[in-house]
Amino acid sequence: MSLTGMLERGLGYHLERRKNGFFSKRNQKGFVPPDGHWRFIVLCAELAQNKLYITDIKVDWAELTIALRKAHHFIASDAVYSNGNKHIKILYDARDILNLKTTYSL
C-alpha cells in the first residue's frame, strides 16, 4: 500500500507502507528534480502539522543534509550536518523541518 498522487506530482518520491509504519521511497521511474526530496519532506511536514494523513515525521540528519544539499540550500545543509555530526540533533520531526524552512527562508 502506498500514498501517491494525492501529494504533489513531479517530486519523485511517495509514501510506502511497511510493517512498522510509512516510509518515503524514491520513485524508480521518471525524473526527480534536484529539490524533489527536500520539497517532499516539507510537504510531509505540512501534512503532519495539519494532521492530514500523517501525525508526524522523523528524518535522520544525514538524509536531511543530502536533501538540502541537492536542493542547493547549502547553509541549511551545513547547519544540519554540523548538528548531526556533533550529536546535537539526530532526528528532525515535522516542527523541526518547518522551523528550518522558516529560519533559512527555504
Image (cartoon, grey):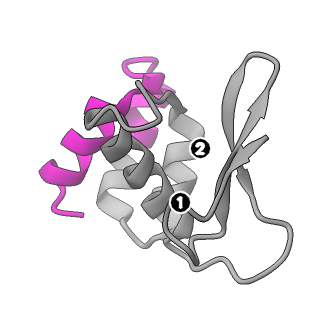
Kindly identify the amino acid type of the residue bearing the numbered disc 1.
Met
Mark 2 = which residue? 63
Please tell me which residue lies in front, 68 or 11: 11
Residue 17 in percent (x, y) is at: 75, 33
- In what element is the residue under mark 2? helix
Question: Is residue 93 a member of the stretch shown in magenta?
Answer: yes
Quadrant (top left/top right/bottom left/bottom right) for the N terminus: top right
Q: Closer to the observer: label 1 or label 2?
A: 1
Q: Quadrant of residue 60?
A: top right
Residue 9 horizontal/vertical position (percent): 56, 74
Label 1 secondary element: loop
| 105 drawn magenta | yes
At label 2, which amino acid type do we have? Glu
In the displayed structure, would residue 9 be above or below residue 67?
below
Q: Name the residue under label 1.
A: 6
Q: What x and y, as percent, mark residue 47?
A: 36, 43
Question: Residue at horizontal 74%, vertical 16%?
Answer: 20
For the residues marked 1 and 2, what is the alpha-carbon distance in whole angstroms?
Answer: 23 Å
**Residue 32 position (above or below residue 1):** below
Residues drawn in magenta = 80-106
